[in-house]
Amino acid sequence: PETCEVRDQFRIEAALMLRLKHPNIITIYEYGDYQGRPFMVLEPLTNDSLSRRMAQFGDHERAAKLLATIADALQHMHNRRIVHCDVKPDNILFDAHDRPKLTDFGVAQLLPNAYQNGDSDSPFSTPFLQGTPQYMSPEQWQNSLSTQSDQYALGVVLYELLTREWPYSGTSPLETGDAHLSKPIPKATGIVSDLPHEVDEVITRMLAKRPADRYPDLSATAEALRELAKVPLSDGERKRRRAVDQRLNRGRWRWWLFGSIGILVVAAIVAVIMWNLM
């Protein structure tokens, strides 16, 4: 049976989402109760998440452009005192026009009024850890939180898109947390050598251990990501991009072919039925 706590959390999530209107945040149309059960009506999205499309963003230009839009969405949230707390590829989905959308506000937190003072680095205490261990900032592992925690998670996503690895992980959540707290920030170029050095500079800033050492806010993060996207691609990145584009084009061609064949088959069946009825 559904507990009151679950229903309350559901309503809190819906109430937070209703505060948000941004092209890169999933839209909630309605929420309420039906026969004693809470419901939420959201805009329809495709089943594709960033975690499924990761191969499409293996060069720094595409990765930076994509995450700059998510940084804009997060700044919109922060302007309304909401911290997402669980930014990761699984929570970035795409709509029918391939527009990325930030989703899943199940563990989002509303900043207390006391911290709505323009200082994005103001931490507040949380009663328990919330989020996904590989993406949680050092301050989250110390039971505190700030808007900069979302920036840290976005830095992890950037690192993961470009290297296919997490910067920190362990055999247990506590081991992963210890790595976030104490291990040096790894260089993406140490894994993918043909990435430009500017990638390491941006990731190092976003993954700084102290929130105050990161970019001042997510608007500044978005600006840094857009500047990173202007850095020319290396030969290796161009080669990887061509390979990805070729695979995508082959996939589109197959779908077009199969779709055309399907339409022709249906048309033939309809023609036969109509002929027999005459």
Image: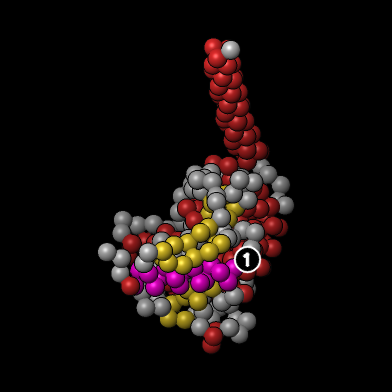
Chief SS of the magenta region: helix
The vertical placement of 66 against 181, above or below, is: above
- Residue 183 visible within the image: no
Query: At x 54% / y 85%, what residue is drawn?
Result: 113
Tell me which colouring the rendered structure shows.
secondary structure
Residue 151 lies in quadrant: bottom right
| Element carrying mark 1 | loop
Foreground residue among 138 and 54: 54
The vertical placement of 219 against 61, above or below, is: below
Q: Magenta span covers which residues?
A: 5-20
**Is residue 16 on the magenta stretch?**
yes
Foreground residue among 244 and 14: 14
In the displayed structure, does residue 148 sit left or right of residue 22?
A: left
Foreground residue among 8 and 218: 8
The vertical placement of 125 against 178, above or below, is: below
Q: Name the residue under label 1.
A: 21
Percent coordinates x, y for residue 55 in the rendering: 54, 41
Query: At x 62% / y 71%, what residue is drawn?
Result: 217
The vertical placement of 56 against 166, above or below, is: above
Percent coordinates x, y for residue 51 in the rendering: 49, 48
In the displayed structure, does residue 226 sit left or right of residue 13?
A: right
Percent coordinates x, y for residue 191 in the rendering: 50, 47
Rate crowding at label 1 as few (under 14), some (14 to 19) or many (20 or more) other CA atoms within 10 Å: some
**Is residue 210 on the magenta stretch?**
no
Residue placed furthest toward the bottom: 114
Percent coordinates x, y for residue 161 in the rendering: 53, 49
Residue placed furthest toward the front: 278
Query: At x 43% / y 77%, what residue is drawn?
Result: 144
Query: At x 41% / y 78%, what residue is drawn?
Result: 126
Foreground residue among 261 and 52: 261
In the displayed structure, does residue 138 sit left or right of residue 173?
A: right
* Quadrant in which the C terminus is drawn: top right
